[in-house]
Image (cartoon, rainbow, N blue to C red):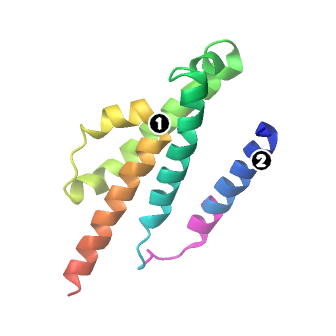
């Protein structure tokens, strides 16, 4: 059986460590950095299948609609997705990505879609940078 408290703590450590790593980098990475959000997209997407199968596709709604903290977390997640989309959009458009196909993806999958969009954007930037240096 999954210990949700320990899993939440592990996720927090990974998130804080990832943010610290990104904050400490001085320049853009030259290696295929798109692999990082790509792996997270696949990993979190694979895990997400388990609760969808066991608790239903709308199982999250009970967590976000029964008390003030649940609603606060729901609004926080929505705001975070919109803010990230807003910040990524100029770079995504600069590499030729269309914005509208990503809107339903983001609001149907949350951070899975957000990380998929980030992966695609970083991949296209990396590909274009390699093309320009040849």
Residue 131, relative to residue 15: is it above or below? below
Residue 113 pos. (x, y %): 41, 42
Label 1, secondary structure: give it: loop
Closer to us: 6 or 20: 6
Quarter residue 14 falls in: bottom right
Camera-nearest residue between 62 and 20 = 62
Would residue 21 be found to the left or right of residue 40 on screen? Answer: right
Tell me what residue is drawn at x 48 percent, y 51 percent: 41
- Distance from label 1 to label 2 (Cα)? 20 Å
Relative to residue 26, is residue 115 depicted above or below?
above
Which callout, 1 or 2, points at the residue further toward the start of the chain?
2
Q: Residue at x 74, y 43 (%)?
A: 8
Residue 83 on the magenta segment = no
Q: Residue 71: which quarter of the image?
A: top right
Tell me: 22 left or right of 120: right
Above or below for 82 versus 12: above
Instruction: Left or right? Give the position of 51 relative to 114.
Output: right
Give SS at disc 2. helix
Rendered residue at 65%/64% (across/down): 20
The disc label shown at residue 75, or none: none
Q: Which residue is mark 2?
A: 9
- Reading the image, the residue beneath label 1 is 110
Residue at position x 58%, y 21% in the image:
59
Q: Residues within 10 Å of mark 2 (few under 14, many from 20)?
A: few
The magenta segment:
19-29
Dot 1, crowdedness within 10 Å: few (<14), some or many (≥20)?
some
Q: Is residue 64 above or below residue 32?
A: above
**Numbered label tally:** 2
Hey, which quadrant is residue 61 in on the image?
A: top right
Q: Is residue 26 magenta?
A: yes
Looking at the rendered image, the quarter that the C terminus falls into is bottom left
Residue 96 location (% of width, % of height): 19, 56
């Amino acid at each position: 059986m999954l210990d949700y408290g320990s899993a939440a703590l592990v996720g927090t450590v990974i998130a804080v460590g990832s943010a610290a790593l990104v904050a400490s980098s001085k320049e853009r990475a030259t290696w295929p950095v798109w692999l990082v959000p790509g792996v997270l997209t696949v990993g979190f997407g694979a895990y997400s299948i388990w609760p969808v199968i066991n608790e239903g596709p709308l199982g999250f709604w009970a967590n976000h609609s029964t008390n003030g903290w649940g609603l606060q977390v729901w609004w926080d997640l929505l705001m975070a997705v919109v803010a990230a989309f807003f910040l990524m959009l100029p770079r995504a458009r600069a590499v030729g990505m269309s914005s509208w196909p990503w809107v339903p993806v983001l609001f149907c999958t949350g951070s899975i879609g957000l990380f998929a969009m980030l992966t695609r954007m970083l991949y296209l930037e990396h590909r274009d940078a390699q093309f320009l240096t040849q």
